[in-house]
Amino acid sequence: MEQRTNLSILGQPTSDAVGRGGGAAGGSGGRAGATRHPLAAVVHGIAPGVGEAHARPRSLYIHIPFCFHKCHYCDFYSIVDTRDRQDVFTTRLIRELQAMAPLSRGEPLRTIFVGGGTPSLLRVDLWKRLLIELDRLFDLSLIRHGGGEFTVECNPETVSPELMAALKLGGVDRVSIGAQSFNPRHLKTLERWHEPANVGRAIELARDAGIQRASVDLIFAIPGQTLDEWRADLAHALVLGTEHLSCYSLTYEPNTAMTARLKRGEFTPADEDLEVAMHETTLSMLRAAGMDRYEISNYSRPGAEARHNLAYWRQESWLAAGPSASGHVLGHRWKNVPRLDDYLAMDDGGWTRVLDHEPPDARRAIAERLMTGCRLREGLDAAEMLERAASIDGASADRLARAWQRVVVDGFAEPMSGSVAGGGSGERWRLNDAGMLMADAIAGRLMAAVAER
C-alpha cells in the first residue's frame, strides 16, 4: 500500500522551509566539514558567473536565529541567546549581504523573506540599520512599487507599533504570523508561548502601520486535538480577515523535544484517519471562504499567494544569508554553517562557510522540480519536463512519460492534464485532490523515472 503524503511542506511545519536549515540543536556539522562558499568564487571571477540578467537571483532569504523560547516541534535553527549578540550578529549579517549583493546587481529583487527564529525579536534599532543596508545594497524598486513582496515572520508576543512602523518604512509589505493554534491547551502541548488573542492584535498593528498583507500559520493533528477544535481554529483565522493561511500537519522531526516526548510516551500522535479528515476539512472550509489551495499546505485568496515561496517551489534562484540559511543559485545548493558562534567567526570577505554544498547536476535538478511541482496547483509543464529528461538521456524521458501515464490511469491527475504520450503544447501535469494526498509517493515515482540507472 502506498504511503500518503506528509502534509507539511517538504516535511517542515512552517511556511518557508526550503530557505532555511534545520537542526533543533543547531544543525549538523559546524566547523568540521565546512567549506568555502560556492558563490565567493563567482563574485571574484574565479568561476563562471551570472551571465544574462534572467539568470541572476531575484529572491533573498534572511535567517534571524534569536528566540525567547524553543518551541518543542521546531526543527529550524534558533537559539535563546543569553549573551546579547544581536548587535554583532547584525554587523556580521550586513557583511554577508554586502558580499552577495553583486550577484543580483542590475535586476530588482522580486521577493525577500526574513525567517527564523523570531525575526520580530530583533531590536527595532537593529531592524532600522538592516533595512537601510538592504535598500542600499539591493534594488528594491519592484518591491516598493507593489510588484514584489517583502515578508517578515513575527511572533504575536513580539509585535509592537514601533517595529511595524520601522518595517513599513523599510519596504516590508507582508507579515507572517505564527499562530499554530488558538486553543491554549494545544499551544501548551506544542510549548508555544503566546496568548491566542495577540495574533489578531499583531495583524491589526501591522495594518495600522500600513502593512496590509498578512499570513497565518496553523498546525493540525496536534495530540489530543479533535476535528471540531481544528474547525474552530480555521474559523478563528478566517475571522481575522487574513489573505493567506498555511496549514500543516504536525510532524515529529528528529532531535526535537516533541519527538523525545513522543518516544517517552507522554502523548499519542493523532490517528491517521483523523489527520486525513482534518486535511479534507481544511480544503472544504477554506474553499467555501474563497481561499483556494495553491500548494499542498498553503491557501490564499486570488492573487495573494506567497510569491517568495513560489520561487522555492518553482526551483528559481535565491540568495540566502544568516546562520543555517539555505540557498540556490546557478544550480548550486548550499546551507550556511548553522551555529551562531561559527557564523560570526567564519568571515571570508563577508561570505560565511557552508555545509552540504551540492554543485549543479541536471538529473538532481529535474528530480527536485518534479518533487516540488507535484505539490503545486499549477503543476508542471509536460513538454518542459520531458525535454529536460531527454537532455539527460532518451530512456529517462520515456520512463517519465510512462510514470505520469500511470498517475493518470490511477485517477490522481486533473482531467485537463490528459495523457502525456507526446507532452502536447501547453499541457500541464497537475494532481487532483486525491492525488495531493499521495503527492510524496507520486513524486517518488516520477523521480525514480529520471534516476540514474
Image (spheres, helix red, strand yellow):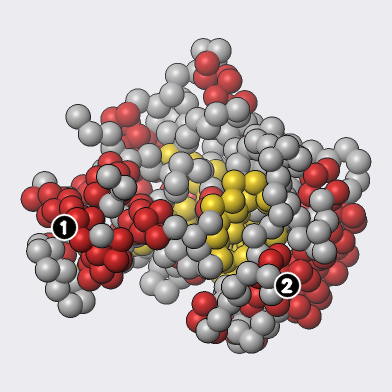
* Viewer-proximal residue among 146 and 11: 11
Q: Determine whether, in the image, residue 86 is placed left or right of residue 239.
A: right
Earlier in the chain: of badge 1 and badge 2, it is 2
User: What residue does disc 1 label?
Assistant: 398
Q: Residue furthest front?
A: 46
Q: Nearer the viewer, residue 137 or 350?
A: 350
Q: In which quarter of the view is residue 415 placed?
A: bottom left
Residue occupying image coordinates x 71% and y 65%: 40
Residue 383 visible at all? yes
What secondary structure is marked by label 2? Answer: loop
Q: Position of residue 316 (x, y in %)?
A: 48, 68
Dividing the picture into quarters, in which one does residue 149 lie?
bottom right
Would you call the spot at circle 1 few (<14 residues within 10 Å), some (14-19), or many (20 or more)?
A: some
Which residue is located at x 69 percent, y 66 percent? 41
Identify the residue position indicated by label 2 in the image. 44
Q: Residue at x 83, y 56 (%)?
A: 347
Residue 175, image x, y percentages: 62, 63
Q: Can you say whether 157 is above or below 238 in the image? A: above
The residue located at (12%, 49%) in the rendering is 406
Residue 67, x across and y down, in percent: 75, 43
